[in-house]
Structures are given as structure tokens and as C-alpha cells.
Amino acid sequence: MTPELSSGRASRRRVLSSLAAVGVSPLLGSVTSTAADAESTDSGLTDALSLGTFESGLDGWEADGEVRLSRTARTDRPVAVTEGEYGLDASADGESVPAISRPVGAFDLAASPHFVADVAPGRVEETDARVAFRFRLYRPADSLDGDLEPVAESDPVAVRQATSGRVFWDAGDVDWSLLDAVSRLELEWYPADRDPDSGDDLAYRGGVVLDAIRATDSVDAVGSARLAATFRDLQFDHGVYERTEVTAASETGEEGEFVFADGATVHYRFEKLGDDRFRLALAGTEVKLGGGWS
């Protein structure tokens, strides 16, 4: 085996190990050869802007309507609180689309346009649907009354009820001048089987714990979270990941199949595109990984 091919496979193992790093059960133990290959729990977040850790307060987050905010301790919610000793408990009692928001202040979101947050939705009354989360950015409107207007919003990321997950948004394609004018960040949620923009009289009753809300200059944090969410859904449908079967490999990439407990196989394609720039395609999802995309 050439050194280049060996290096490519090591890169693949390192990148795929990010699945375990973001909270997924040991999905890829058979392909992660050493502990040294593993990413840290907060892969891609070393230089992140902390927008909510809730260790000493609510960190500027507010809610309107029938949403109550309080801090919850790791001792009470050990799975939901992912960083430090406290998270944010947001409890809705009839709000149509619960949301929390905070001022951006001096944070430079144009330089850090990739957002992640750990969430743990509880049971929601009258539906078993997953809970969809959506980020939104606002800027001051051209008025004298202090109104805000939306700048951009993310696609929804859904998390099953009574489980934990990481939601994400790669806002790197939003014009930097718009990001530079942002004054407020919002995170909303609603049952994924309902249209939050329909105007229907929805009534969300249930709680969500949020923690480790961050913005970062690295798309790797979003990629790792997207990859973990994809594998989490695959495992829900097909049982635990069992092994990887490589069908083709070269100095710059690899493809093959992930095999799951029920015998299902999912094709993947891994490419090394440049210095610390990787792309992994599987299950209809393309994931950017590595710190070289900025």
C-alpha cells in the first residue's frame, strides 16, 4: 500500500469517527483503529462563540408567549445537559410555535456562520411526530419603532421525542453583509408533521432542554452533527451499525457500504477534496467535514 493511500484511509477513519464524537453510540468501532483517531466531543468547536451554556444564568435568552424558561441541572437531566452542570429548560403550554431568542451583541456572526445546539425534546401532547427545530436571524427594520425583520432561516432539523440530538445550520451561504447586520438569533421548534407557517391554530404543550448553543467559523461542526443525525435515523430504521464493506479505494477517496443489524446496506462515497476538506455522501445526504472549507 502506498503512503498516500494509507494516509487517505487514515483520514477516512478519522472523519468517520466523528460519528461517535457527537454522541452516537459506538457506530464505527470496527473502522476506528485507535483512540488517537477519535475527534473530541466538540469537534470543530475549539474557537466557537458560546451563545448559551447556562452555567450562571440564561445567557441573554428570552421567550415570548406561553413559554417559560428556567435552568435545569445535570443531576436532574443527565442526558439532556451536555456541557457543564446546567442547561436551559423551555416549557411551552399552548404556544403555537415555541421559540427562544437572544441579542447577538458584539458577536461577529459573519466570521462564524455555522450554528449548532444540543436539544432534548420531551413528550409533546397529541402527537408522536418528531420535533423540528429551525434557526432564524433578524436585523433592525427600516423603521423608528425598533421592529426586526428576518434575514435568513435554516432548514428544519428534526429530533425524535424523548431523545437528545444536535441541531445545526450552515449559514455560510448567507451574504456576509446581511450577517454583519444581524442583531438577534432565534431558535424555534414545532411538531414535524405540522406546517408552522400555515396559520393554523397549533398548540404545543411540552418541554425542551437546550444546551451548548454555539456559532463557529468551521463547517466541520455542522458536518459532524449532520452525519450523526443521518446515522441516528439509519439506526432507528435498521438497527445498530455493524460494519463497513469497502468496494473501491484510491489516494483521494473510498466508497462502499455501511451494513446494519437488519441486513440493510447503505452506500457511501468518501472524497478528500483538498487540505483538510472532505465530503461524505450517504443516504441522500452530502456532508462537508474538515477545517479547510473556510
Image: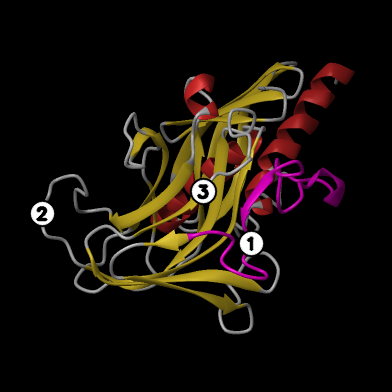
Residues packed near mark 1 inside 10 Å, few (<14), some (14 to 19) or many (20 plus): many
Q: Residue at x 55, y 27 (%)?
A: 180
Q: Is residue 221 left or right of residue 10?
A: left
Spot occupied by residue 263 in the image (x, y as percentages of width and height): 45, 50
Spot occupied by residue 261 in the image (x, y as percentages of width and height): 49, 56
Task: Report if residue 263 is visible in the image.
Answer: no
Q: Which residue is mark 1?
A: 53
Residue type indicated by callout 1: Thr
Residue type indicated by callout 2: Asp
State if disc 2 and disc 1 touch (CB < 8 Å): no
Q: Earlier in the sequence, mark 2 or mark 3?
A: 3
Q: Which residue is mark 3?
A: 103
Q: Residue at x 40, y 35 (%)?
A: 140
The residues bearing labels 2 and 3 have C-alpha atoms spaced at a distance of: 29 Å
Give the residue furthest to the left: 200
Q: Is residue 13 left or right of residue 125?
A: right
Q: Residue at x 72, y 29 (%)?
A: 291
Tell how many labels.
3
Q: Is residue 32 left or right of residue 294?
A: right
Residue type indicated by callout 3: Pro
> Is most of the magenta stretch helix, strand or loop?
loop
Residues packed near mark 3 inside 10 Å, few (<14), some (14 to 19) or many (20 plus): some
Q: Is residue 44 part of the magenta span, yes or no?
A: yes
Q: Which residue is mark 2?
A: 200
Q: Is residue 42 part of the magenta span, yes or no?
A: yes
Q: Earlier in the sequence, mark 1 or mark 3?
A: 1
Mark 1, secondary structure of its residue: loop
Q: For this rendering, which residue is in front, 83 or 101?
A: 101
Q: Which residues are magenta?
A: 32-61
